Image (cartoon, helix red, strand yellow):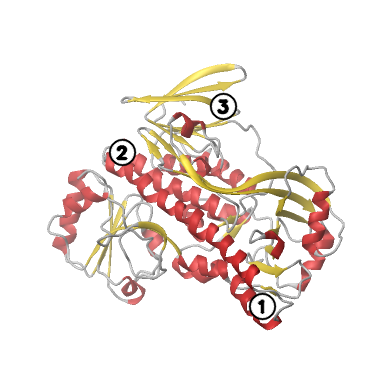
């Protein structure tokens, strides 16, 4: 990079490269420092949510991600829940993410994380002004009023990089978070969990008793609400497996195969490719910003890989932060806009870790303690089915929103949260639901890179006033004019100001008397 970067991103995993893509496509010069020279072959972080695929479409990689899947096109992505083991009498395969599909402009996808990273790296190499330095390690970060300095090492040499901002996407042991003195806390369940990657055509054949799915969760009373679960990497042979293990369990000990056979309910032939371990805990940073330093992804929040929340929330961090950094660097975003990143994102993941994941574990534990199939099979079957549908219920209410953000016109007393209701109504602080314009094209296909004013049956003078307010503040604004009819009537309002991250900043049926104030609030410059 010949020019000084504006943003240094420490960590070139999917969140770091996703942020670099978001910034680069907005014309921001950024440099990504990644200590790994090669990608890991461990197939973690496989599920990409509908919301993540909306980002992928905007970044120009949705088709490439779908083409990179390891499973056949059209193979169901959902989950089977089984009691005791995979041969158990009680099992259920209820709907999950498909329950909320209508509220997003893209369908979800599933592929190993290393394939996602391959696609993102190829795309970022095409974007001018973005440099990815592999094999470089950040060791120090400091800042003052003029910018940041990141000390990096490579092949025994040391270099100090300078930029306006630094973002730590460098995982649970983040150097950026530590140097910025950002505290974190959470719940530790004091459980060691194994991750096993293996191959077994025999297990694949045994799973034919169930409808085609991608993951198989085993509930067992001995696990106290924790799970054993198998996940497909492809269809036919490769799987991954998670389960709690006793302290001291080793990767090459007999316990691993015994555990796999216990969870399956029968011995089966397998070839193990990888065994790793992780601690069952939730950790959330108390804030995501310290001056010119920001954190995102696992640097900001870590939790068990239950429900696919980690990677997807990290990429949502990137989408939230990217446009705000670009706005500040371009001069039309204020410090309040930068501060809103932490105020919006931190409460969401706090709820994900403590209420959704923690609540899921507590609810399963309570059910297994209360009901046993040997006591009353019919009563147990009803309770088990209710527990199996728990993920779907949580997804229905998992509707991250920023109602309490200072840069949206949320309801009085609104708070930012992971909990909400999916609806087609356009609401300040909430993700804009996809609807079709009168032309038949989807709204998401027409949204601008900056703010978008969706003006339905709006008068020319009002639109002109909003456009003039945007020009006076230097805010990029796209205006979409249409009739308040058809699917657009579902929005329930005539005027919708949409942020660059597709969240609604303001709504109204009449134009505001002071559109400058609306835009100044939404950009943190009021």
Neighbor class of circle 3 (other Cα within 10 Å; few <14, some 14-19, many 20+) is: many
Residue 488: x %, y % from top left: 33, 71
Residue positioned most to the bottom: 378
Pick the quarter of the image with the C terminus.
Answer: top left
Identify the image quadrant of residue 122: top right
Mark 3 falls on what kind of element?
A: strand
Q: Nearer the viewer, residue 208 or 37?
A: 208
Q: Nearer the viewer, mark 2 or mark 3?
A: 3
Residue 230 sits above or below residue 492 on the image:
above
Q: Earlier in the sequence, mark 3 or mark 1?
A: 3
Mark drawn on residue 380: 1
Q: Would you say 367 lies left or right of 55 here?
A: right
Q: What residue is pinned by disc 3? A: 137
- Tell me, yes or no, whether the two marked residues, 3 and 1, touch with CB atoms within 8 Å: no
Q: Nearer the viewer, residue 448 or 410?
A: 410
Question: Does the image show residue 333?
Answer: no
Q: Earlier in the sequence, mark 2 or mark 1?
A: 2
Mark 1 falls on what kind of element?
A: helix
Question: Does the image show residue 291?
Answer: yes
Mark 2 falls on what kind of element?
A: helix
Q: What residue is pinned by disc 2? A: 328
Cα–Cα gap, marks 3 and 1: 53 Å
Question: What residue sits 50% from the left and 18% below the top?
Answer: 159
Cα–Cα gap, marks 2 and 3: 27 Å
Q: Earlier in the sequence, mark 2 or mark 3?
A: 3
Residue 340: x %, y % from top left: 33, 46
Residue 329: x %, y % from top left: 32, 36
Question: What residue sits 54% from the left and 17% below the top?
Answer: 158
Residue 434: x %, y % from top left: 41, 66
Cα–Cα gap, marks 2 and 1: 56 Å
Residue 189 sits above or below residue 11 on the image:
below
Residue 107 sits above or below residue 370 on the image:
above
């Amino acid at each position: 990079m010949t020019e000084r970067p504006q943003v240094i991103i420490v960590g070139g995993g999917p969140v770091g490269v996703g942020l670099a893509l978001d910034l680069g496509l907005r014309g921001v010069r950024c440099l990504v420092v990644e200590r790994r020279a090669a990608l890991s072959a461990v197939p973690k972080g496989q599920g990409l949510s509908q919301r993540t695929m909306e980002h992928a479409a905007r970044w120009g990689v949705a088709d490439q991600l779908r083409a990179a899947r390891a499973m056949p096109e059209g193979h169901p992505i959902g989950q089977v829940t089984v009691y005791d083991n995979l041969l158990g009498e009680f099992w259920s395969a209820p709907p999950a993410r498909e329950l909320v599909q209508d509220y997003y402009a893209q369908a979800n996808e599933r592929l190993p994380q290393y394939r996602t990273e391959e696609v993102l790296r190829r795309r970022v190499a095409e974007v001018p002004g973005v440099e990815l330095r592999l094999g470089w390690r950040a060791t120090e970060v400091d800042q003052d009023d003029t910018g940041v300095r990141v000390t990096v090492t490579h092949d025994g040499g040391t270099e100090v990089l300078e930029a306006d901002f630094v973002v730590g996407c460098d995982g649970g042991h983040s150097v950026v978070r530590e140097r910025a003195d950002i505290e974190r806390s959470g719940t530790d369940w004091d459980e060691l969990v194994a991750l096993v990657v293996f191959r077994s055509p025999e297990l694949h054949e045994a799973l034919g008793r169930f409808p085609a799915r991608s993951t198989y969760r085993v509930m067992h009373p001995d696990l106290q609400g924790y799970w054993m679960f198998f996940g497909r990497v492809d269809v036919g042979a490769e799987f991954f497996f998670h389960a709690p293990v006793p302290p001291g369990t080793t990767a090459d000990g007999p316990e691993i195969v015994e555990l796999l056979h216990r969870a399956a309910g029968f011995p089966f032939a397998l070839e193990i490719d990888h065994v790793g371990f992780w601690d069952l805990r939730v950790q959330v940073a108390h804030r995501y910003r310290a001056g010119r330093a920001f954190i995102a992804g696992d640097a900001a929040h870590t939790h068990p890989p239950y429900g696919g929340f980690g990677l997807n929330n990290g990429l949502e961090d990137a989408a939230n932060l990217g446009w705000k950094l670009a706005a500040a660097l371009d001069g039309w975003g204020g410090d309040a806009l930068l501060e809103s990143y932490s105020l919006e994102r931190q409460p969401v993941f706090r709820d994900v870790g403590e209420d959704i994941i923690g609540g899921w574990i507590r609810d399963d534990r309570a059910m297994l303690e209360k009901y046993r199939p040997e006591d009353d099979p019919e009563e147990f079957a009803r309770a088990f089915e209710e527990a199996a549908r728990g993920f779907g219920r949580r997804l229905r209410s998992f509707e991250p929103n920023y109602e309490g953000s200072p840069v949206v016109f949320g309801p009085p007393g609104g708070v930012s949260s992971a909990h909400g209701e999916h609806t087609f109504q356009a609401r300040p602080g909430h993700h804009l639901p996809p609807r079709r314009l009168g032309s038949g094209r989807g709204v998401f296909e027409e949204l601008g890179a900056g703010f978008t004013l969706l003006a339905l049956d709006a008068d020319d003078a009002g639109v002109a006033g909003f456009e003039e307010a945007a020009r006076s503040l230097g805010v990029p604004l796209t205006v979409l004019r249409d009739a308040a009819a058809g699917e657009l009537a579902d929005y329930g309002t005539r005027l919708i100001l949409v942020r660059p991250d597709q969240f609604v900043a303001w709504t109204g049926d009449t134009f505001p008397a002071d559109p400058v104030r609306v835009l100044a609030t939404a950009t943190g410059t009021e």
